[in-house]
């Protein structure tokens, strides 16, 4: 039997996400935006809640197409507020629209969002050596810096804890426990 990070708790949603995505370096613009959007909606909730609703989010938010999301109007906001398949939080929905606009501005300034976001880890994955999930921090100096800069650029729901979760998801940090079979694979 494969040894996994203990946070998976033998839950099928967590296991699939852990084995196929978590910690793999992401450089695709749409995927980076997807993680930003989902991490913002996760604020105050469990990641498992988001994973269970991920397909609904994908449908509701035009497959995470930030060029469409940035154009959402009040009618679309109301449609999303009535969508029982997603987290219906007006502030988070409005933040996703504003974040799409800020994302596009960064692309124009840096060429790609990827160029911008990976600078916070010097364009390479930080490989940590944690033995247990209790050792894994909720923030880091890199996530603190990222959070401050994203906020300065108009992003919402990008506190340091959310930024660190984003960094873990996007493979900017490898926080697989060293006993996990994925630790050396990513």
Image: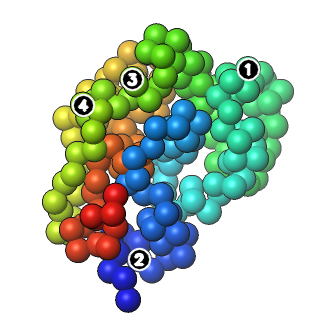
Furthest residue in direction top, as rendered: 109
Return the mark for residue 9. 2
Q: Residue at x 46, y 33 (%)?
A: 157
Mark 4–mark 3 distance (CA, rounded to whole Å): 10 Å
- What residue does disc 1 label? 71
Residue at disc 2, secondary structure = loop
**In the picture shown, does residue 34 fall above or below 156?**
below
- What residue is rendered at 52% in x and 12% in y? 108
Around disc 1, counting alpha carbons within 10 Å, would you say few (fewer than 14), some (14 to 19), or many (20 or more)? few
Q: Earlier in the sequence, mark 1 or mark 4?
A: 1
Q: Quadrant of residue 179?
A: bottom left
Q: Earlier in the sequence, mark 4 or mark 3?
A: 3
As helix, strand or loop, the secondary structure at mark 3 comes to: helix
* First-in-chain label (2 vs 1): 2
Q: Which tag, 2 or 4, sits closer to the chain's start?
A: 2
Q: Is residue 92 visible?
A: no
Q: Which residue shows up at 66% across the image and 38% down it? A: 64
Which is nearer the N-term, disc 2 or disc 3? Answer: 2
Q: Nearer the viewer, residue 163 or 43?
A: 163
* Quadrant (top left, top right, bottom left, bottom right) of the C terminus: bottom left
Disc 4: which residue: 122
| Residue 173 position (above or below residue 10) | above
**Mark 3 vs 1, N-terminal side:** 1
Task: Answer left or right for 30 relative to 139.
Answer: right
User: Where residue 88 appears, x then y in whole percent?
Assistant: 67, 44
Residue named by callout 3:
116
């Amino acid at each position: 039997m494969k040894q996994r990070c203990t946070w998976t708790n033998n839950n099928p949603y967590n296991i699939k996400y852990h084995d196929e995505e978590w910690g793999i370096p992401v450089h695709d613009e749409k995927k980076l935006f997807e993680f930003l959007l989902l991490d913002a909606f996760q604020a105050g909730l469990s990641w498992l809640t988001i994973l269970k609703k991920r397909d609904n989010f994908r449908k509701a938010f035009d497959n995470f197409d930030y060029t469409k999301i940035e154009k959402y109007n009040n009618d679309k906001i109301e449609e999303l507020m009535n969508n029982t398949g997603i987290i219906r939080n007006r502030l988070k929905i409005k933040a996703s629209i504003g974040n799409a606009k800020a994302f596009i501005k960064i692309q124009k300034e840096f060429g790609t969002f990827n160029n911008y976001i990976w600078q916070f880890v010097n364009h390479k994955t930080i490989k940590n050596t944690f033995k247990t999930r209790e050792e894994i921090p909720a923030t880091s100096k890199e996530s603190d810096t990222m959070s401050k800069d994203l906020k300065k650029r108009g992003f919402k729901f990008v506190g340091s804890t959310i930024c660190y979760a984003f960094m873990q998801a996007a493979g900017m940090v490898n926080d697989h426990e060293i006993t996990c079979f994925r630790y050396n694979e990513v």
